[in-house]
Image (cartoon, grey):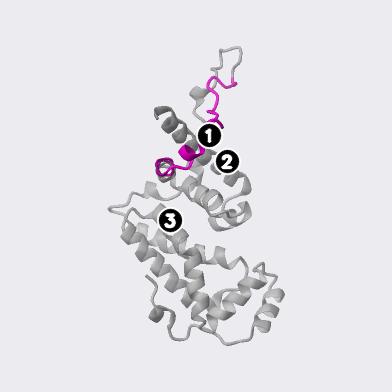
Amino acid sequence: MISKRMYQLDNLYDRAPLQKTVIKAKLAGVVASADDLFLIEQLRNGDEAAFVSLVDRYHALMMRLAMVYVSAWAVAEEVVQEAWVGILESLNRFEGRSSLKTWMFRILTTCAITRAQREGRSIPFSSLPDYDTDLAEPAVDPNRFFPADHQWSGHWASFPSNWQDLPEERLLSRETRACLEKAIEALPPGQRQIIILRDIEGWTSEETCRLLGISEGNQRVLLHRARSRVRGALEKYFEEE
């Protein structure tokens, strides 16, 4: 985990007042919020409570995303720790051209990709997100639609299940949650990143696109495909019960 010593690195922060930071940011035409700029100033001034709050807020998500790139939890922990060190060492280089959150997770992604490449003998490169490949697959199993020679070609042959009549206890059960988590873990890496960010963490489409460097259209398609896969896994689970 992150230690106090890690935060007390030498030459980490600039003690310039917040007002100077805000003015500089405005002149640069950046998009970081006033809250982000204030938090950065606290971190630069060595405010341990501010750093702890940041870790509490984002550490779990950083672990989730690191696991998209590496196959072992222990390796993901090392990646995340390396990312936190990188974030602290780079505070003076934060220019506010993105949100603090996006900037932090770009550092994490860089650390994760570098580690995955270093572990290349045991971690297949197919585990790295490939958004173009993800776009090539159908969003829904084609067998659920009538074939081209049918009078209702392209229409549903097998409608999605309606779960309105399922007891709430079953929908919210530990077993259902385990099935959901397993379905998300089985997604292609690019789709898994997007569904984690959008549906689990509540990021906006704009934030997600900025972090992953993809277009809004691609993000929308990949999210739809991820949701379809997860829904398909849940349908199968409920049918087998």
Give the x, y percent position of residue 122: 28, 52
Circles 1 and 3, Cβ within 8 Å, touching? The answer is no
What's the CA distance linking mark 2 and mark 1?
Answer: 8 Å
Q: Position of residue 63 (x, y in %)?
A: 42, 59
Circle 1 packing at 10 Å, graded few (<14), some (14-19), many (20+), is some
Contact check, label 2 and label 1, Cβ < 8 Å: yes
Tag 3, which secondary structure? helix
Vertical placement of residue 202 versus 172, above or below: below
Q: Which residue is mark 1?
A: 139
Label count reads 3
Which residue is at the front of the view, 129 or 143? 143
- Of callouts 2 and 1, which one flags the residue occurring earlier in the amino acid sequence? 1
What residue is pinned by disc 2? 221
Per the rendered image, the range of residues in magenta is 154-179
The overriding secondary structure of the stretch rendered in magenta is loop
At a point 38% along the width and 46% down the height, the residue shown is 126
- Amino acid of disc 1: Ala
Residue in the foreground of this view, choosing between 11 and 160:
160
Q: Residue at x 44, y 42 (%)?
A: 173
**Which is nearer the N-term, disc 1 or disc 3?**
3
Quarter of the figure with residue 114: bottom left
Q: Is 162 on the left or on the right of 19, as rendered?
A: left
